Amino acid sequence: MLALKKALVKVDPIPVLIFDESMLRFGGRLGTVTGIKLRELSRGRQVILITHLPQIASFADFHFKVRKIVQNNHTTTSVELLDPEARVKRTSQNDERGERNQGCPGSCRRTLTQATKIS
C-alpha cells in the first residue's frame, strides 16, 4: 500500500493517509527504508502511522503514545504527545522487530539523530 500511495501521490487528492504496520513483521534495514519513504510521502500529505518499530518511529515529526484502558466494560483512550526525552525512552522500549525489551536509550538517540539528518 505504501508503494502504491507513493506512486500515486501526484494524482491522489486524499490529504490524509493512515497506515497500521502492526500486522507486518519486518525491521532493521527495511524499517529504515520504510521510514524514509513515509517521510517523503508526508511532505505533501498528512501521514498517520501506528508503529512499534523504532526505525520507522524515528522519522516522525511528532510521536504520540496512545493508551487504551478497559474497565467495567467501559473503554477509555488517551493520547499523549511525547517530548524529546520521553520519545527516546518510549522508542527504546521496542527492538527492531517491534517487540518489547529493556531498551537502549543511547542507541535510540543515535537513531533519532540519524533520521533527522536523512530527512
Image (spheres, rainbow, N blue to C red):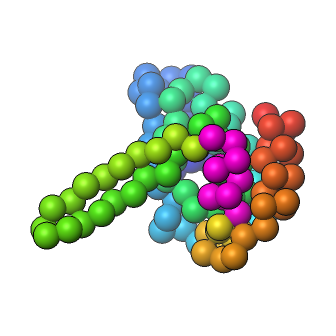
Nearest the eye: 54 or 11:
54
Asked if residue 10 is among those painted magenta in the image, a careful observer would answer no
Nearest the eye: 100 or 47:
100
- For this view, does 5 lie left or right of residue 107? left
Which quarter of the rendered picture does the C terminus lie within? top right
Q: For residue 56, say whether it is visible.
A: no
View extreme (left): residue? 73
User: Does 52 sit above or below residue 42?
Assistant: below
The image quadrant that residue 32 belongs to is bottom right
Residue that appears at 68% across and 58% down = 89
Q: How many marks?
A: 0
- For this view, does 13 lie left or right of residue 101? left
Residue that appears at 86% across and 52% down = 110
Q: For residue 87, say whether it is visible.
A: yes
Where does residue 84 sit, x and y in percent of width and height? 69, 42
Residue that appears at 33% across and 60% down = 68
User: Does 21 sit above or below residue 41?
Assistant: below
Residue that appears at 72% across and 70% down = 103
- Magenta-colored span: 83-92
* Dominant secondary structure (helix, strand or loop) of the stretch shown in magenta: helix
- For this view, does 83 lie left or right of residue 29? left
Where does residue 49 sit, x and y in percent of width and height? 51, 47
Where does residue 116 sit, x and y in percent of width and height? 80, 37
The image quadrant that residue 96 belongs to is bottom right
Asked if residue 90 is among those painted magenta in the image, a careful observer would answer yes
Where does residue 108 sit, x and y in percent of width and height? 78, 57
